[in-house]
Amino acid sequence: MTRGCAPVVARICPLGRNAVKACRTQYNRRMQTAGYPVQFEPVRAEIAWGPLFWTAVGLGAALVIANALDGETQVRRCSICDRLNHDARNCPFDGRRERLYVVKTGRCDCCGRRVGMTEGHHYGGRGDGSKGKELCGPCRLHCGHGGNFRNLGINPRYCRLYS
């Protein structure tokens, strides 16, 4: 049976599925010769847009009212450092580098050794210049960054190398 044609047209048409126009013409001619002044009209499905629209409006209004009545505040979580109460736009770990305000004494704050060269370590992120420690090179790598400088800086509570 061809799409859009009545079963009668499908039975009359000897030309196959691709000749729908020829079927309509042949069907109309046979109906007129038989004395019926009827033209072939394809059947179309009508969509009721009114109820669909009002259903969408009702669901949208219910969603707006439910969000307005919900008293919980949304907690922001940063996608860079995975901490609460800030997001990636103002994350201190990914911000502009600030000067680290640490008085250099030549003593590592992690292992307590006196070394010739110490480095400043931003454990609060490079955008926060107030949180920092003076660490030796090995302690900065292993204790301050967990063995890889691509890791975020942490505040070492104990020395992971010399404890």
Image (cartoon, rainbow, N blue to C red):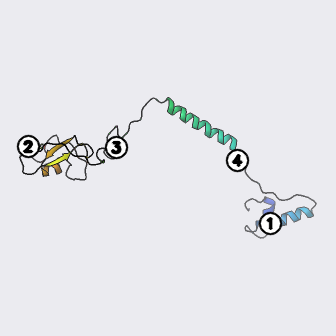
Judge whether residue 65 is colored magenta.
no
How far across and down, in percent of the image, does residue 104 sit? 11, 45
Task: Identify the amino acid type marked 3.
Answer: Asn
Which residue type does callout 1 highlight? Cys
**The residue tagged with tag 1: helix, strand or loop?**
helix
The residue drawn where x is 13% and y is 47% is 135
Marks 1, 4: nearer the viewer: 4
Task: Tell me the CA gap for discs 1 and 3.
Answer: 70 Å
Residue 35 in the image: state x and y as whole percent.
94, 60
Q: Amino acid at mark 2?
A: Gly
Comparing marks 1 and 2, which lies closer to the viewer? Answer: 2
Q: Residues within 10 Å of mark 1 (few under 14, many from 20)?
A: many
Q: Tell me the residue that label 3 is attached to.
A: 90
Nearest the viewer among 66 and 34 is 66
Mark closer to the chain start, 2 or 3: 3
Residue 133 percent location from the top left of the image: 16, 43
Image coordinates of residue 75 in percent, x first then y, are 38, 36
The residue carrying mark 1 is 23
Amino acid at circle 4: Ile
Q: Which residues are magenta?
A: 85-92
Between residue 40 and residue 12, name the one nearer to us: 40
91 in the magenta segment:
yes
Marks 2 and 4 sit apart, C-alpha to C-alpha, by 79 Å
Residue marked by disc 4:
47
Q: Is residue 126 above or below residue 63?
A: below
Q: Quadrant of the N terminus?
A: bottom right
Dot 2 or dot 4: first in sequence order is 4
Q: Earlier in the sequence, mark 1 or mark 2?
A: 1
Mark 1–mark 2 contact, CB under 8 Å? no
For label 2, the residue is 112
Mark earlier in primary sequence (1, 4): 1
The correct choice, above or below, for 42 with respect to 126 in the image is: below
